[in-house]
Structure formats: structure tokens, C-alpha cells
Image (spheres, rainbow, N blue to C red):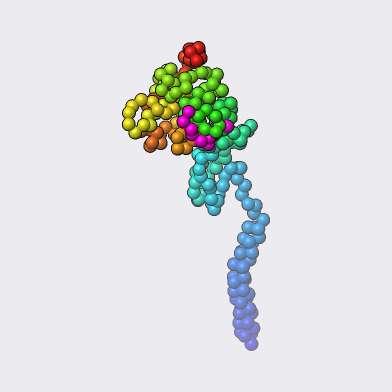
């Protein structure tokens, strides 16, 4: 009988130990869960994004580029600086000329261009009902810069100081030979910057094009700058 009692007690002890051993993992899991529940989410410096956030790419209006793709690790995303005091006109032409808004400063010029934009081409025309290339550049030079030039593109070329392509500045003239046959100047536009110029094209009317376009680059003859003395001489003869 004593042996049976000892055996029973021993069995209870071992059973209790076994229960304690089995119960211990559960207790640990509960402690870990409780610890995880009270642990605060990590805070990061503003501007840092973590896995799972898609990042858009492209070029903003100020020309700054940002990275496209899916962020797989903490990445610093630089947001473009806000554009202050930007007019709708500046924004429009900054997009058209692929340049910073800050560089669209001659509002008188762009207001004048905006007035003529999409006006149809008419040979010999000088009004908003129809205008040709030299009348258009002459109007811009007079109304914006106070310069007087001759009526034809050929004479405007003769009166201008010749400027290399990489030295062109906004307000300079750009000249082309668009004839299928023959040589010499037959078309003129006004340079705006970043390779772009405005002109009255025979098939497009008043528009904006780029010197690097295949057609215009093959027709380009050179650039010219009208100085005040040439303008004064022209005005005196008219």
C-alpha cells in the first residue's frame, strides 16, 4: 500500500510537471503578444517612405526629376518646391517650351504671342485675320522690343547681326530656306529659348516649333539680332 501511495504521488508530480512544461510555451506566446501589443510603431523623419509605397516619376515644371518605381527599402523622396506667384500664362509657356517657370519672365512677349497664337497664315497679311512670317516677327519686335524692321524676311536677315546657333537669345530672329528650289531666306521666326521659336507657318499658322525638329533643322540658315542702330536706320527709310 505505501508503495502504491508513493507511486501515485510520483505520478501526480510528474503529471503536474508535464502540464507546466506544456503550458509554458503558451504563457510565453501570451507574453510576446502582450509585449507586441504595447510596442509603439516606429516613427520616421518626414519624407522617408518604407516598403510598399509606389513612387511616381517624371519631370515637374521646374525641371527637377524624381525617381519612378516601387520602393523596396527606406527611401528619401524629395518633393518639388512649391511654385509661388506663377501666372497661368507663365505655366502654359513653361510647358510648351520645356523650361522652368522662373525663366518665363518676359510677360509682354508671351502675352503678345498668346494673342496671335493659331492665327492663320496669309501671304502679305498683317492682321489677326491672317498674317505672314515677316509681318509676325516685325510685329513682335515692334510691340515688345520697340524695334523697327523691314517688311520681308530677306531684308530682316540683311539688317540683322549674324548670331551662332548656340549663342541665340530670346528675341533674336531665326532664318530658313523653305523653298524647294533656289537659295536664300524665305522664312523667319522669333527665338524664345531652349531651341524653340515662334513663327507664322504657311501650313500651321502662328505656332511654336523647335530648331531641332527634322524639318526645321534641315532648312535652318542662321540667326540674327536686330540692334537699335539698324532699327533706327530702317525707320528713317520707311
Residue 64 screen position, x and y as percent:
52, 37
Asked whether 116 falls inside the magenta stretch, the response is yes
Q: Is residue 119 above or below residue 141?
A: below
Viewer-nearest residue: 129 or 94: 129
Residue 96 screen position, x and y as percent:
51, 36
Looking at this rendering, what residue extends furthest in the bottom direction?
1
Looking at the rendered structure, the number of numbered marks drawn on it comes to 0
Q: Which residues are magenta?
A: 115-124
Q: Is residue 78 above or below residue 142?
A: below
- What's the residue at 54%, 21% (across, down)? 142
Viewer-nearest residue: 25 or 118: 118
Residue 102 visible within the image: no
User: Seen in the image, is 107 located left or right of residue 132?
Assistant: right
Looking at this rendering, what residue extends furthest in the front direction?
124
Residue 203 visible within the image: yes
User: Seen in the image, is 154 located left or right of residue 16?
Assistant: left
- What's the residue at 37%, 29% (across, down)? 177
Residue 167 screen position, x and y as percent:
42, 23
Residue 126 screen position, x and y as percent:
52, 28
- Main SS type for the magenta part? loop
Asked whether 3 falls inside the magenta stretch, the response is no
- What's the residue at 63%, 78% (across, down)? 12
Viewer-nearest residue: 67 or 163: 163
- What's the residue at 41%, 36% (across, down)? 213
Amino acid at each position: 500500500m505505501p508503495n502504491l501511495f508513493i507511486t501515485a504521488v510520483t505520478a501526480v508530480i510528474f503529471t503536474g510537471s508535464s502540464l507546466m512544461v506544456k503550458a509554458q510555451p503558451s504563457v510565453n506566446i501570451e507574453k510576446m503578444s502582450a509585449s507586441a501589443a504595447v510596442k509603439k510603431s516606429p516613427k520616421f523623419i518626414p519624407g522617408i517612405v518604407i516598403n510598399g509605397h509606389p513612387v511616381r516619376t517624371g519631370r515637374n515644371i521646374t525641371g527637377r526629376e524624381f525617381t519612378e518605381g516601387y520602393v523596396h527599402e527606406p527611401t528619401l523622396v524629395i518633393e518639388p518646391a512649391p511654385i509661388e506667384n506663377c501666372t497661368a500664362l507663365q505655366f502654359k509657356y513653361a510647358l510648351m517650351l520645356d523650361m522652368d517657370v522662373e525663366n518665363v519672365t518676359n510677360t509682354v512677349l508671351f502675352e503678345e504671342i498668346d494673342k496671335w497664337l493659331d492665327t492663320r497664315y496669309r501671304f502679305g497679311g498683317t492682321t489677326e485675320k491672317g498674317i505672314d512670317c515677316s509681318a509676325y516677327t516685325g510685329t513682335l519686335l515692334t510691340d515688345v522690343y520697340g524695334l523697327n524692321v523691314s517688311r520681308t524676311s530677306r531684308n530682316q536677315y540683311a539688317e540683322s547681326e549674324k548670331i551662332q546657333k548656340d549663342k541665340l537669345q530670346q528675341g533674336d530672329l531665326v532664318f530658313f530656306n523653305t523653298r524647294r528650289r533656289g537659295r536664300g531666306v524665305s522664312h523667319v521666326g522669333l527665338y524664345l529659348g531652349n531651341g524653340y521659336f515662334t513663327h507664322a507657318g504657311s501650313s500651321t499658322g502662328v505656332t511654336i516649333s523647335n530648331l531641332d525638329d527634322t524639318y526645321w533643322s534641315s532648312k535652318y540658315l542662321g540667326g540674327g539680332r536686330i540692334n537699335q542702330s539698324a532699327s533706327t536706320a530702317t525707320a528713317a527709310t520707311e
